[in-house]
Amino acid sequence: MARHYIAYNKVAEWGPVLETGPEFTFWTARRLADLEKILGQDIWVVSGESVGGRMTYKLCHVYRAEKIIRSGAGHVIRGTGTRFDPHADVTDEGWFGKLLLEQNNFSRGLNEIKDSIIINALVAFLSPPPVAELPHEIAQPQTYSEGSFMPVMVNAYERDPGARAACIAHYGARCQVCGIDFEAQYGERGRGVIDVHHLKALAEVGPDYKVDPIQDLRPVCPNCHTIVHQGAVPLSMAEAKGLVRKKYS
């Protein structure tokens, strides 16, 4: 299983993080012997900048370390990955506070992430909410017609990727009904693949409802998510788990 590292860029000293294309680099003063174990692993780049007297932290990109190049008094780690556009402000995320403590305020600049809650929260940024086919899950308003020209409109609710990330950071990317973990089952291709289910029906609470990602959301796999909503009234988590137990007990 891949390990994860955090690379910190202090904007006041190194300038803003700028990227072009899918290739990324990060300079570090760490020794070559320390860096060789990072090859093939994921590096998450976070920038920190003082804005109005308060530190603001942004998640810039993540990439897989592929090559180490000598550069001045240190080394450049080069690789390819994913850029977050725009950079995601993570200053007030609960898991980020844990990261600051774990990394001693990024005192080493480049270091391994140990806490699985932090890793799950980061991985969630790579798996945006899917556009589901259930009416209450549609991410954007859409019009459909089939066989005739009569349009059918469905309600749409804006999704908050921060709430999704916080939910997965707390519970992990494992289905809370059947227990499947897609990364454990399928390897790298399944990393971060999971739906997030609203315990309170969105059609009932309305678009202005403030979602509590711990109390209101649960990670569920697409199969279980479909079964939960297969009917006029969604199943509770306990009812859905009961069906799984009944089938496989």
Image (cartoon, rainbow, N blue to C red):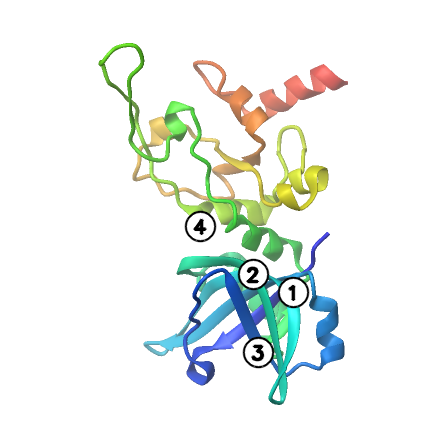
Q: Which mark is residue 162?
A: 4
Closest to the observer, 213 or 141: 141
Hey, which quadrant is residue 30 in on the image?
bottom right
Residue on which disc 2 sits: 80
- N-term mark: 1 or 4: 1
Asked if the residue at tag 4 contacts the one at tag 1, i.e. Cβ–Cβ closer than 8 Å, the answer is no
Asked if the residue at tag 3 contacts the one at tag 2, i.e. Cβ–Cβ closer than 8 Å, the answer is no
Q: What is the CA distance from the residue labelled 1 to the residue labelled 3?
A: 14 Å
Q: Secondary structure at mark 3?
A: strand
The correct choice, above or below, for 246 with respect to 32 in the image is above
Query: Which amino acid, mark 3?
Result: Trp
Residue on which disc 3 sits: 27
- N-term mark: 4 or 2: 2
Closest to the observer, 150 or 108: 150
Q: What is the CA distance from the residue labelled 2 to the residue labelled 3?
A: 15 Å
Eye-nearest disc, 3 or 4: 3
Query: Which amino acid, mark 2?
Result: Thr
Asked if the residue at tag 3 contacts the one at tag 1, i.e. Cβ–Cβ closer than 8 Å, the answer is no
Residue 201 image point, x, y percent: 41, 28
Query: Which amino acid, mark 4?
Result: Gly
